[in-house]
Image (cartoon, rainbow, N blue to C red):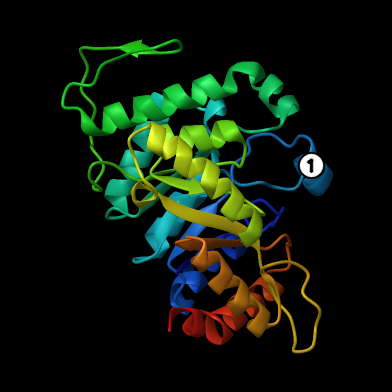
Amino acid sequence: MRFGFIVPHNYGLKRPEDVTRVAVRAEELGFDSVWVNHHVLHAGFILDRLGDKPYYDSLTVLTYASALTSRVRLGTSVLVLPYLNPIVLAKTLATLDVLSGGRVIAGVGVGGLRHESDALGKDFERRGAYTNESIAIMKELWTAADPAFDGEFFSFSGVKFSPKPVQKPHPPVWVGGQSNAALRRAARLGDGWHPTAITPEQLGERLDYLSARLDESGRTMADLTVSVRAELDVLAAGSEPQGPMQGTPDHLLTSVESYAAVGVNEMIFAMSTDDTSRIDRVMEAFATQVMPRARG
């Protein structure tokens, strides 16, 4: 089992160094990856949480974190593809993959905030089709010597694309979401599936559906990484669990083993707080009290 941690760039911290030092500390503690979230505007629950406090740009933070680290993978959980131009994004991610020595994981999704989508001038109803096309375009640009594409939203030919990513054939694309549409997208276009806030029992049910869709695409579960995002907290002995990954070290270890038993390869942890001292304590507690046992 591999473990990742999401940096708190989306919790209104005034000092950007408090955000990026979490990435450095995660690497020091032995986590395998560091991650960022993605929103552009404060709308819906983001507005309720932050008001006018900062939500730092995802890929800028991840690029800065790449310069401060040397080993951890660098992931997005997840980029809302309908907000982004896939050609420009392919360039940004390929550049980051080169600069970081091949450490990028491109987690992607369709997004669910209509208010934000509308404000950005995007077609909320067509976001699934746009996402599918965006994934195909990025893979074409990353792998083809003479990339060309003719789709609903973008068409191009007679161009070159460079740099190509370090990772071959390309940085892994992990599809977020738990809906049937997300699972079909992961089966057809993804290198991984990355659901959020799902129990091991729920995960097993969804994996049955995913396996069937993979079979229809001529693929198997061996072709995908399964990564679960979960809220993390390490509680004192005797405390009642608050969720699969919110409890005592023994409870967390049991949960990790349950996720592994149904096929999870990596767990990505979030902490919904701007208290960086608490983040430090929980990261260290998990790294010292749970991680060695889970890996051993």
Q: Quadrant of the C terminus?
A: bottom left
Camera-nearest residue between 117 and 128: 128
Give the residue drawn at x 53%, y 38%.
Answer: 183
Give the residue drawn at x 29%, y 53%.
Answer: 102
In the image, taking residue 28 as reference, residue 156 lies left or right, namely left
Element under label 1?
Answer: helix
In the image, taking residue 217 as reference, residue 41 lies left or right, namely right
x, y percentage for residue 53? 75, 48
x, y percentage for residue 227? 50, 55
Q: Quadrant of the N terminus?
A: bottom left
x, y percentage for residue 61? 51, 51
Asked whether the viewer can see residue 109, the reply is no
In the image, taking residue 115 as reference, residue 245 lies left or right, namely left
Read off the residue under disc 1: 45
Residue reaching furthest to the bottom: 237
Give the residue drawn at x 38%, y 59%.
Answer: 67
Residue reaching furthest to the left: 145
Camera-nearest residue between 7 and 18: 7
Vertical arrangement, residue 240 with respect to residue 64, above or below: below
Camera-nearest residue between 14 and 237: 237
> What type is the residue that disc 1 sits on?
Phe
Asked whether the viewer can see residue 55, the reply is yes
x, y percentage for residue 178? 61, 42
